[in-house]
Every structure is written in structure tokens, then in C-alpha cells.
Image (cartoon, rainbow, N blue to C red):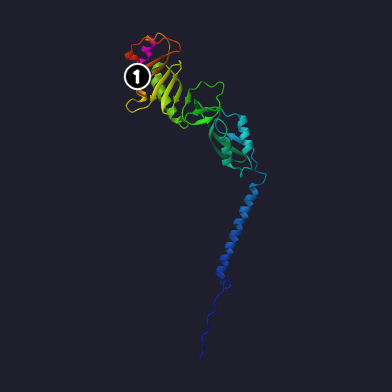
Amino acid sequence: MRRKSRPVAEGFWDRPPLLNLLADVLFLGSIIVFVYASVITVVRLPMFPLKQVVVSVPLKQVTLAQIEYAAQSSLTGNFFTVNLDGVRSAFEKLPWVRKTSVRRRWPDGLELAIEEHVAAARWHNSDDESRLVNEQGEVFAASLPADQPSLPLFGGPEGSSALMLARYREFTELLAPLGRVTRGVMLSARQAWQLRLDDGLVLELGRDQAKHPLHERLQRFTGIYREVQKRARTSIAAIDMRYPNGFALRPGRGEAGVNLPSSESQGKGNT
């Protein structure tokens, strides 16, 4: 009686389909490695140097010297290897630069789109650093050029610049019928508002309240301003509008006062 022979187990090398698959994988991997190495070699060749930086929008505040300085400190590598984020960061550190976008410009340059700050006010601070407020209500470090028109002065807690700019625009609109211009806006730590007008008059508005909002106090001021000017015997340093139904006057230093009945010039305090 014949004994059946056991089938011989096939090894890896006895499986042509697997060997063909392995060969294909190795061949494909070698191609990928070769292409990658070739690309790295090519982009590092000195045949792709950066030769120009093009600013796509006209600039008013940023100077050519500042652009050259930022470019020299940030442009390393060639057209392919230059770090665009590093270039953008270097330019955004310049005074008056709010945002910068950078893209490659074939075959040997970079194109910059620079958004400058547009100053809306000066920012008062206790240190010697010159700071401004832009039209978005952001504080930035820069000095006004000598030919820049005078800007209003803001002073308030850190982080309040956007609120102050919004209020300044509201105050400007309310004061427009009088032809007066706001030169200073101050906001105390207790959120009390004070305005200084172009004629030197100080307006004490106090804190904004639901029952007596700031715009009502300013509207009341515009209603009495002409009459106060007519009836005043001397100059007025300040008008306190923190009263619900009246106001208080402070004459200039060393002057007698104004010729107004007490019922019109004063009321119960509302700070």
C-alpha cells in the first residue's frame, strides 16, 4: 500500500508573484528617493538666487531703507528654499506695517503686499514710547511724521483703544453741529469719560449709564453750549455734564465765573 506524500510547503522565494511585487515596490521606492534627492540638489544650486523684492502696493510711511534692512536680515536661501513665514515676520516688525503677505515671483524674486497702519489717534502712556492708534482701534509703536496733521490724544486703560475709537467717532458726530472738534478723549479706570475740545474746553461726561447714556449728555451739551457762551462773563475751563437734569461750570483759573442762574448751572450729581 502506497503512502501519500505530504505536499512540500512553498517558501517566499518559491512564490514568483510575491517576488515580482517586491521588485516593483523596491523599484518604485528607488525612483521616489532619486527624484527627491534630485529636487533637493537642484533647489540648492546657486542657479536660483533671489535677485529682487517687489512691493505690489505704494507705501506712504514705510521707507525704502526699512525695506532693504528687512530684506537683508530675512532673505536666506534661494528662490525655492527661502522661508516665506520668516520674511513676512521680519517685515511685520517694521514701524507702520500692520500686515504683510509674501509670495514667490518666478524666476528670481519675491512679491510683498504690505498693509500699512493708518493712524487715527495718538495714545497716551506713562513711558517714553511713542504709540498710535490705527483705524481698527489697535495700538502700535510709531512716531508721527512732522508733516502729519494733528491727531486727537487718547488716554485710557490698556486694551480700551478700540472702544475709545468707536466712542470718539460717536462724539465727533454729535459735536459736529457746533463746529467743535474733539482733541482729547480720556477714559479713567472707573470708566468715566472726559473730552477736551479744540477751544480748550473740558467736558466731564462721567460713566455711561442706562438711565443717563453718554449720547444724551452730549446732546444736552450741544443744546446749551451757545447760550452758555453768550451769557458767560468770562472764559469757561470745564463743563460738568454728569448731572441728570443740569450741568456745572468751572471758570478759567483766577476768573470770577459766569452769569447763569444756579438752577441752570447746577443740578444733582450723577457720576
On screen, residue 17 above or below 140:
below
User: At x 64% / y 48%, what residue is drawn?
Assistant: 42
> Looking at the picture, how far across and down is residue 245, in whole percent?
32, 19
User: At x 40% / y 19%, what residue is drawn?
Assistant: 175
> Looking at the picture, how far across and down is residue 113, in whole percent?
54, 35
The part of the chain drawn in magenta is: 224-230
To which quarter of the image does residue 224 belong? top left
> Looking at the picture, how far across and down is residue 268, in whole percent?
33, 20
Q: Main secondary structure of the magenta part?
A: helix
Viewer-closest of 43 and 169: 169
> Looking at the picture, how far across and down is residue 213, in whole percent?
35, 26
Residue named by callout 1: 220
User: At x 35% / y 19%, what residue is drawn?
Assistant: 220
As for residue 227 lying within the magenta part, the answer is: yes
Helix, strand or loop status at disc 1: helix
Give the quarter of the figure containing the C terminus.
top left
On screen, residue 194 above or below 94:
above
Q: Does 220 sit left or right of 140 as displayed?
A: left
